Each structure stands twice: as structure tokens, then as C-alpha cells.
Amino acid sequence: MSLIPSATEIVAALGHGDALVGRSHECDHPPGVEALPALTAPKVPLEGSSREIDDQVRALLDEAMSVYDVDVERLNALRPDLILTQSQCEVCAVSLPTVEQAVADRIEGSPTVVALEPRSLADVRDDIRRVAGALGCPERGDRLVRRMRDRMQATSNAVAPADATDRPTVAALEWIDPLMGAGGWVPTLLEAAGGTPVFARRRGDLDALHEADPDRFHAAIDRSHRDTAWRREPAPAPSATR
């Protein structure tokens, strides 16, 4: 069972997609995974503006409450042997403590819980290997990581400018209001794609973004709000790319 989209995609990439019995409400890839029962749901309504959602999420966190619900009845009925979750961000997806509490309170048996914690591209590769190990196919994990490295290097070689000063500055945004610059592994990806990241790991307003003076920006809106953000709120500049 996977309670985070990235883990769902990792399981499928490792050739074990058929073993999945449940998913998070955000899992939508690979095609067909939506047919699996969803075990999580956000406590905050997603129909509001970015600012309204951010305020409600922060109110929950201030009360030391989880941002997501877990359907423990369904979780227990499915009786998974392995549960994949994350421990990096309490806002991005259901948290490790929430999953551990659900397991302790209601689930019969003792499923293995593996929490991803990718704060860099190297961590992403390590998490792939950890998931592969938990699935009993460590060699597949190694092969997948090698393929990823080879593809990334080939892409980087193809787009690298002859003159380093020709690299455009890029602001990657993961939230609209307040503006939030993507962190984690995203700056590394921007560099590999031939850009120079700016406004990374920052939170601010349009003035702060203008001070960063990016040549381009990339909108990588959080999954919880990506379907409505661009319809409800104008992009920070007319040259926005998705």
C-alpha cells in the first residue's frame, strides 16, 4: 500500500504495481492506479484560494493536528504487508506519525512501514533502493537508479550551454499565495537542465520574486491545489511555464 504518489510510481517502476492494494487520494499515475481504493483525504477543503488553504493548514499545524485523515477501517480491511509513506513534510502528504498511529490503533498484524524522506536527489535514489529492498528486489532498485542517472546525464550534456554565463536563472514555484520557491531536489534538477535556480527554498510575495529577477519561472504547483490554482489566481508574470 502506498500513501504517497512518488512511492506509488516507484513501486510501479520496480515492476510491482500489481501488488498495490491501496493508494493516497493524490495518486494518479501510472494510469489505472485510480481504480485502487483511496485511504487518505485532506482535512482542508481545496476549493478556496491558495492563501485560504495555506491559512487553514497552518491553523491545523499550530494545533499539532494532522492535515490528512486516514481511513483506518479500510486500511485494516485491506491488511497490507507493506505501507509506504513519508516523513519529510507534514503538509505535502499524510505523515509518518499519522500512519504509525493508525497501525498501532486499528490494524491487525504487523505491516512494515517504510517512510520516504527525500531532501536531495541523492535521497531520492536512496529511497528507491529502500523501497526495492522492502519489496525484495534490490537489484531492480539498483538498475532503476542507474537508468535515472544515465538519462539525467544525457539530458544535462545535451542542454549544457557552451558558456556558463548563458544559463538562464529560473524560479521554480510550488505555491502561489504566499509564493513558495521549491527546494529539496528541484534546484539540482534545474541545474541539470541548464538553468541557475533562484528564489529556491524561499517564501515571500511578488516583490521578493521580482528582487530575485529570474529570467524564467516554472510552476510546479503542489498536487493538493494544482487543479484550481491557475484558474483562480493570476500567474506572477505573463511568461509563466508549466
Image (spheres, grey):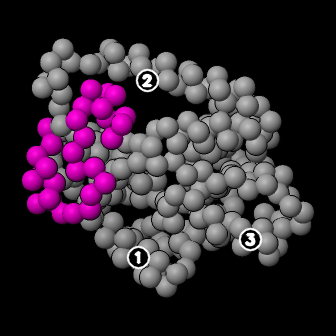
Q: Which residue corresponds to the image point at 51% horizontal and 47% vertical from the top-left?
A: 118
| Left or right of 95, for residue 78 | right
The tag earlier along the polypeptide, 1 or 3, is 1
Q: Is residue 162 visible?
A: yes
Residue 15 in percent (x, y) is at 72, 30
Q: Is residue 73 visible?
A: no
Give the residue at the far bottom of this rendering: 63
117 in relation to 132, above or below:
below
Residue 192: mark: none
- As helix, strand or loop, the secondary structure at mark 2 comes to helix
Give the residue at the far right of this rendering: 109
Q: Which residue corresponds to the image point at 13% horizontal and 24% vertical from the top-left?
A: 166
- Position of the C terminus, as image quadrant, is top left
The answer to which of 127 and 159 lies nearer the viewer is 127
Residue indicated by mark 2: 152
Using the numbered discs, state the Cα–Cα distance from disc 1 to disc 3 in whole angstroms: 23 Å
The tag earlier along the polypeptide, 3 or 2, is 3
The tag earlier along the polypeptide, 2 or 1, is 1
Say what amino acid the circle numbered 3 marks: Ala
| Left or right of 145, for residue 170 | left
Residue 164 in percent (x, y) is at 17, 23
Residue 58: mark: 1
In front: label 2 or label 1: 2
Q: Which residue corresponds to the image point at 21% horizontal and 45% vertical from the top-left?
A: 198
Residue 102: mark: 3
The answer to which of 178 and 128 lies nearer the viewer is 128
Say what amino acid the circle numbered 1 marks: Arg
Magenta range: 187-215
Say what amino acid the circle numbered 2 marks: Met
- As helix, strand or loop, the secondary structure at mark 1 comes to helix
